[in-house]
Amino acid sequence: MIKKEMIAMLLAGGQGSRLGVLTSKLAKPAVAFGGKYKIIDFPLSNCINSGIDTVGVLTQYQPLRLNQHIGIGIPWDLDRNIGGVTVLPPYEKSENTDWYTGTANAIYQNMEFMEYYHPDYVAILGGDHIYKMDYEMMLNFHKKNGAKITLATYEVPWEEASRFGLVITDEDNRVLEFEEKPEHPRSNKASMGIYIFDWDVLKEALITLKDQPGCDFGMHVIPYCHEKGDKIMAYNYQGYWKDVGTLSSYWEANMELIDIIPEFNLYEEFWRIYTKSEIIPPQYFSPESRVSGCIIGEGTEVYGEVYDSVIGSGVTIEEGAVISNSIIMNGCVIKAGAKVEKAILAEHVIIGERAQLGVFEEAENKYKPGVYAGGLVTIGEDSVIPPDVKIGKNVAIVGETVPDDYPDGILASGESIIRQ
């Protein structure tokens, strides 16, 4: 029998609907971040940096590009004969064939995978946060306190606490109570959705709750174990942690990377973030180009001006184009004279000559006001914007649009064009 002290199960099946058109064709963990990376690179890199060499990645929604990115795990040194990275989609079984219906249900459906490694401990990780964390330190805390379950917590601002699942602890950080998104929070310790379980405790809980509809860790498994009397500890994480679940938080997290002294440093030697990177040429900046405060990916050619932006790989920014406060993903083309202000462009978008994005006064989005907010222009992948149009703020566009889609050459703030 193969024996591993701790394996990791990485939940990467989410759609990420609050990211709107960015996730219409791919899973949230596969969304680009920081010009070079995908969101899933961060927990995968954390695993190998923490000495975890066996990772199951649970996929479900639009998994193709995520699967291609992970491959056999070479960039993260997870191409192992024993262990390594394994992609675990839902599969047909002799009975109870089902999609993953909740975080714990997804883990339960992969009991056989975990049994194979007979671990002492199982780490449950989310695939959609930006952070660097040493899971080995968390495991040491778990052992030292004789815990059955340890959950990572992060102190959030009190005014934001009601958005999170919160834990109330005693002075030794033992968990006493849980509050799920309370209106009047009594704690600001938010659960990060990162857990370490003793394997026998996790196994018993998953089997007991296997018929619970939509079985979830925060809603069902942790409260069940708490009621049973299992010792649950809170591990207070002190570093940078960002939930990039909304367009505004995703944009902010990218913009924070280009601060003079970034709070989240991608350049640290001792805790590298690894990714799959295609072999492409270096960047090129023409003599006329102007660039300030940016991250620019490999193979990108800049002939225009770029300020305070995160630019992916293989992007072309033509003469006279001006980009500021924006995220431009791989393979986009910004044609001559175009102006792009506070926009998020998914992969392979073409912006026509002299088009202007992010103009006019802000107005609430009529299609999905809770998603398309913060004054952003969000363009889905493979979209085409025709020349000479003016596009407002809080706008979403997907598809190959033509001049007739823009009455008087304008798409006003708060409007959308969605062609899936």
Image (cartoon, grey):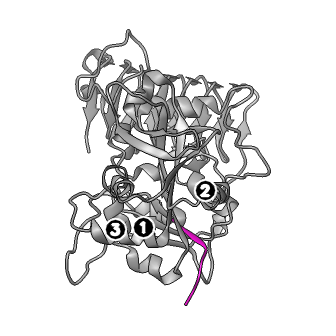
The numbered mark, 1 or 2, whose residue comes first in the sequence reads 2
The correct choice, above or below, for 327 with respect to 221 in the image is: above
The correct choice, above or below, for 354 with respect to 294 in the image is: above
What kind of element bears circle 2?
Answer: loop
For label 1, count other residues whose C-alpha is less than 10 Å away and answer few (under 14), some (14-19) or many (20+). many
Q: For the N terminus, which image quadrant? A: bottom right
CA separation, marks 2 and 3?
Answer: 23 Å
Residue 275 visible, this orientation: no
* Residue 100 percent location from the top left of the image: 29, 63
- The number of discs equals 3
Disc 1 and disc 3 in contact, CB within 8 angstroms: yes
Camera-side residue: 267 or 415?
A: 267
CA separation, marks 1 and 3?
Answer: 6 Å
Q: Which residue is mark 1?
A: 202
Q: Which residue is mark 3?
A: 206
Camera-side residue: 106 or 307?
A: 106
Q: Amino acid at mark 1?
A: Leu
Q: For the C terminus, which image quadrant? A: top left
Q: Locate residue 252 relative to residue 351 in the image: left or right.
A: right
Camera-side residue: 38 or 349?
A: 38
What kind of element bears circle 1?
Answer: helix
The numbered mark, 2 or 3, whose residue comes first in the sequence reads 2
Q: Quadrant of residue 110?
A: bottom left
Residue ID at (54%, 59%):
147
Residue ID at (30%, 75%):
91
